[in-house]
Image: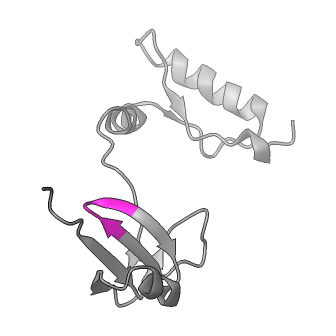
Amino acid sequence: MSPAPHTQLLVGGRIYSAGAPDATAMAVTDGQVVWVGADRPGRALHPDAEIVDLDGAFVAPAFVDTHVHVTAHGLALTGLDLTGATSREDALRRLREHAAGCDDPVLWGHGWDESRWPD
């Protein structure tokens, strides 16, 4: 016989959730997020849960990502930061200048937001 599932209900917080932007509570059963919403419905849906008061703390349900993002961050430290590029031409100018002073055959550019460019 397997043990009964253990549920914690985190209440009184600010829970990041695209599907429930005003969430203040989150239920976690055996380490897995099973529900996100408001405190009162959470208590009704999970009456036997262990209650954890977040006291207004921010929670972002996630997973540990060690496969790419750490590597990308490292590459960004030595790459070409284009966050300040104001147009396509500005980004290309920055790229040309960076390439002229770089011996690496691979250039790593990051941070641009073409949706803010006029062109």
- Asked where in the image residue 26 lies, by quadrant, the reply is bottom left
Magenta extent: 28-33
- Quick one: which residue is furthest to the top in this view? 105
In the picture, which quadrant includes the C terminus?
top right
Residue that appears at 54% across and 65% down: 17
Q: Who is closer to the viewer here, 4 or 24?
A: 4
Residue 100 image offset from top left, x and y in percent: 53, 16
Q: Main secondary structure of the magenta part?
A: strand
Query: What residue sits 49% from the left and 71% below the top?
Result: 36
- Seen in the picture, residue 56 relative to 82 is either above or below; the reply is below
x, y (%) of residue 50?
Answer: 25, 82
Looking at the rendered image, the quarter that the N terminus falls into is bottom left
20 on left or right of 115: left
Q: Is residue 35 magenta?
A: no
Depth check: give the residue in front, 111 or 67: 67
Tally the numbered discs: 0
- Residue 6 appears in which quarter of the rendering? bottom left
**x, y percent for residue 109:** 54, 29
Q: At 28% across and 72% down in the image, what residue appears?
A: 7
